[in-house]
Amino acid sequence: MFTVTVRDQMLIAHSLRGEAFGPAQRLHGATYVVEATFRRAELDPDDVVVDIGRAGKQLRAVLAELDYRNLDEEPSLAGLNTTTEALARVVADRLAERVRDGALGEAARELDAIVVTLQESPVASASYEREL
Amino acid sequence: MFTVTVRDQMLIAHSLRGEAFGPAQRLHGATYVVEATFRRAELDPDDVVVDIGRAGKQLRAVLAELDYRNLDEEPSLAGLNTTTEALARVVADRLAERVRDGALGEAARELDAIVVTLQESPVASASYEREL
Amino acid sequence: MFTVTVRDQMLIAHSLRGEAFGPAQRLHGATYVVEATFRRAELDPDDVVVDIGRAGKQLRAVLAELDYRNLDEEPSLAGLNTTTEALARVVADRLAERVRDGALGEAARELDAIVVTLQESPVASASYEREL
Amino acid sequence: MFTVTVRDQMLIAHSLRGEAFGPAQRLHGATYVVEATFRRAELDPDDVVVDIGRAGKQLRAVLAELDYRNLDEEPSLAGLNTTTEALARVVADRLAERVRDGALGEAARELDAIVVTLQESPVASASYEREL
Amino acid sequence: MFTVTVRDQMLIAHSLRGEAFGPAQRLHGATYVVEATFRRAELDPDDVVVDIGRAGKQLRAVLAELDYRNLDEEPSLAGLNTTTEALARVVADRLAERVRDGALGEAARELDAIVVTLQESPVASASYEREL
Amino acid sequence: MFTVTVRDQMLIAHSLRGEAFGPAQRLHGATYVVEATFRRAELDPDDVVVDIGRAGKQLRAVLAELDYRNLDEEPSLAGLNTTTEALARVVADRLAERVRDGALGEAARELDAIVVTLQESPVASASYEREL
């Protein structure tokens, strides 16, 4: 079993809904350091899991849709409680769509799974894993 | 599959039993950077894996029982060879007990698993994973 | 010359004024990992630069005034363009005031200088240094 | 389930074959920060996954065969496209051979699996996992 | 005194001249994680040390001249023993030239100093500091 | 101005004297991640600040005198309150002695200064700087 991981970040504002979130119910923000891990059983004809340059560019493209924005007013996230967990799923689902669309190359369609981790601070992170 | 990870640390003294440990048989110490990862298949009604504030507080409470102590004289660890692996299980088991007791909230009782990792230095770490 | 450094973080929302900031003119946010370094030529009677527990508590208190907030609406920052550099100075000045007020102990009044560094992402940080 | 991880690094030159690699087709190099994770269900009689001192020494021995070398001219890698993924497998396979040969001790023969991760830069890494 | 630091990396091959370098006399390589720190006494009219976006782009441009290359065959480094220290000076001098040329903006001409640090592995780094 | 930094670690037990230390008055321990930075104005004939291999070996030798020990019973530290600050000075002074003795090579006698930093946890560190 092989994996490749690329890393990037996004700086966003948001607020969370629910008493459990305490002060995080206020409008605040975060730098999310985002890691996307791609997994497959065998390497492709280029001896890689996925073209790491393409993987980095597609992760950047997905994050650019949210970067330097207030997620509370982001139409594509309307109705979503943007917890770190929920955002990890958003990023993973959008990357998965790009894999299906061929944006990571033909060989990438044989990827088995993707894991997206968002580190919100040195003491807290969340991840979401899904099949491809 | 979702996870949430919280991080904290503890500073302890101890010695290890067994010739294989060489100089670590002497009384020495370590800063353990501790990560506790909670895992579940679906998010709870607040759209989280677990209340990250509560998770951090319970991890702190578990570590406070050992922090700034000589583990060789810690009654609750009597008879235990306090290797990094063994301490990872102690922390995981104590967190699991707190989950069962409801200290992380009602929804946390549906967590699937917990993984505890202790980084003892930049070049060595150990982890223990268990179901909940 | 001795130093002691303590680290903490704050999660804030803000926007920046000036065309040079490009997309950062929009309301967004950041996790600032904050390091405060205290410097003095000789150790105090306890053989430390400053009581590290007190230093951490005072840094926490200063950050708590800004944490989980939208800095654009923070009265104490009214009129300030909250660049990372400017925020480093705000944190340093507020810590310096606490040193003068004795909140870090009597011996801390003999500290020579303080440096505050804010890491806003893995690729960017800023710092401010001042005498005490 | 327990794991132990040891970390070391190697500094190598190489070039990659295939248009997909763009500028990495040129002779260049990398510092690979290498983590080897050993996994087993139960601890051995010394209460460890594997003797961490021995694990570190064997990882060092495996890396020393490649360290400070141009992998394009390394006989033992002849014909291999030395992507990060492929090198992760080389390191894992060589460690697995040492486990089988008893170099990590008798108890290490009961290890279940090994994962090797190579971090090539702050933004990219690859891993390979295999059974033992 | 204020500073701003940006970070990037380059992956190069090279060999070092001199018996003292032992195995590093062979052709090998490194990932250099490069930090460039800009320093000035007062903030510019935008309340920054330097436009962090421009600083990052100019650092990228300087590193791109060396990235994915064999420095032993790099004409602009002919005759240079490319130790980490020497490369830190090359990067700092090239950045300084860009500051003088106005590539970081008019206000950047009032920067006081620049420090460039190259981390070649988790256990070794070098830096060079110069006035502007 | 050039610097070179090498990094290593030591795992020790100790206790601190003085009410200000609270729970750290109890016997506990720490992993100190130790960085030693050497500084000089011009490079030596090998184009380095100091032979990085030798620097790493001498740092290891200095740390080996304390590693895996209970500092409360260490004869060479008798009477010393082993705060992180005080230990930084011990390590720096012992390295300085080795520089004077020629253990880092003849050229190293022209080093200007040394800075030793001990990171005791992700949230606290101390340093000591001295001339050579």
Image (cartoon, coloured by chain):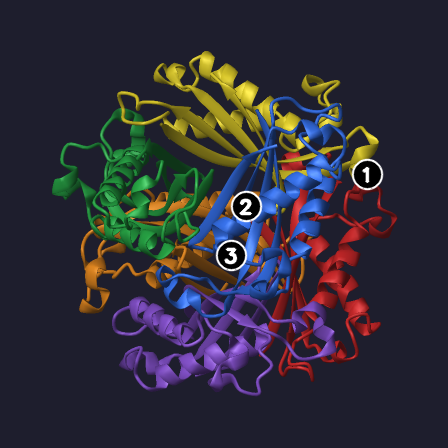
Chain colours: A orange, B purple, C green, D red, E yellow, F blue
Foreground label between 1 and 3: 3
In this rendering, position of residue E74 left or right of residue B92: right
- Asked whether the residues under marks 1 and 3 belong to the same chain, the reply is no
Q: Chain of mark 1?
A: E
Determine the secondary structure under disc 1: helix
Q: What type is the residue that disc 3 sits on?
A: Thr
Query: In this picture, is D33 found above or below E6?
Result: below
Determine the secondary structure under disc 3: loop
Does the image show residue F66? Answer: yes
Q: What type is the residue that disc 1 sits on?
A: Gly
Inter-mark Cα distance, 1 to 3: 37 Å
- Give the residue pinned by disc 3: F82
Does the image show residue D29? Answer: no
Determine the secondary structure under disc 2: helix
Q: Residue at x 59, y 43 (%)?
A: F92
- Asked whether the residues under marks 2 and 3 belong to the same chain, the reply is yes
Mark 2 Cα shell of 10 Å, populated few (<14), some (14-19), many (≥20): many
Q: Quadrant of residue F110?
A: top right
Q: Upstream in the sequence, badge 2 or badge 3?
A: 3
- Give the residue pinned by disc 1: E22
Mark 2–mark 1 CB contact (< 8 Å): no
Q: Which mark is residue E107?
A: none
Q: What type is the residue that disc 2 sits on?
A: Arg
Pick the residue in front: F6 or E106. Answer: F6
- Give the residue pinned by disc 2: F89
**Where does the N terminus of chain D fall, quadrant-wise?**
bottom right
Q: Quadrant of residue D23?
A: top right
Q: Chain of mark 2?
A: F
Pick the residue in front: D86 or C85. Answer: C85
